[in-house]
Amino acid sequence: MLQLAESYAGHNTFYFCYDADTTRRLPHAYLVPNMARNPVEFLKNLVRVTRIFRKERPDLVISTGAEIAIPVVLVAKVLRIPSIYIECGAQVTEPSVTGRVMYWLAERFYVQWPELREVYGPRALYAGSLIDETAPEEARP
C-alpha cells in the first residue's frame, strides 16, 4: 500500500488495512485488527467498516490481498459502492483464500501474475506488476 500511495496523491483516499508498522505511516488509514479467519473478529470488522463507510461515504473501494478486503467489499456491495480487488500477494500459481472469495464479490478483479488469470477464471484481469520496478500493463480481458 505504501508503494501505491503516491499514485493517489490529490485524491481523498482512505486506507482500510491491518494495524502494522508499515500501515501506520499511511495517510488517512483506518487500521483494524487482523481477523485471521476468526468469525467474531470478522463480524466486528463488518460493523467497523460499516460505520466508517457511513461517515466517509466513499464512491469507490479498491482493495488488495489482505483478509480485511472481504468485509470491506461486502459492506461496499450492500451500500452499492463499486469495488475493485487487486490480488497482489506473492502467490504466483495458487489463488489465496481471500482471492477466491473476492473473485465473486468484487465488481472488477485484477491479478498481477498472468498465471493466476487462468487459475481464477474469465473474470480475472491481468494488470501486470503493481509492486516492482516495471510499469503496470494495461488490464486485458
Image (tube, rainbow, N blue to C red):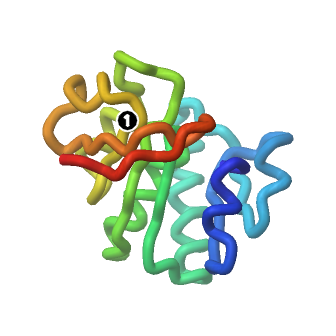
Q: Quadrant of residue 115?
A: top left
Q: In the orientation shown, which residue stands out farthest toward the left? A: 122
Report x, y in % for residue 70: 44, 47
Residue of label 1: 99
- In the depicted structure, whether residue 12 falls above or below residue 127: below
- Number of numbered tags placed on the structure image: 1
Q: Quadrant of residue 76?
A: bottom left
Q: Quadrant of residue 13?
A: bottom right
Please tell me which residue is depicted at 72% across the width and 50% down the height of the picture. Answer: 2
Residue type indicated by callout 1: Gly
Please tell me which residue is depicted at 62% across the width and 68% down the height of the picture. Answer: 8
Report x, y in % for residue 89: 52, 30
Report x, y in % for residue 126: 31, 40
Q: Say whether residue 121 is left or right of residue 63.
A: left
- In the depicted structure, whether residue 25 falls above or below residue 113: below
Q: Nearer the viewer, residue 77 or 125?
A: 125
Q: Say whether residue 115 is left or right of residue 89.
A: left
Label 1 residue SS: helix
- In the depicted structure, whether residue 45 falls above or below residue 55: above
Q: Is residue 40 visible?
A: no
Query: Could you classify mark 1 by the number of other residues whose Cα lies within 10 Å: few (under 14), some (14-19), or many (20 or more)?
Result: many
Q: Is residue 87 visible?
A: yes
Please tell me which residue is depicted at 73% across the width and 62% down the height of the picture. Answer: 29
Q: In the orientation shown, which residue stands out farthest toward the front? A: 134
Report x, y in % for residue 105: 28, 51
Q: Nearer the viewer, residue 80 or 127?
A: 127
Please tell me which residue is depicted at 19% across the width and 45% down the height of the picture. Answer: 123
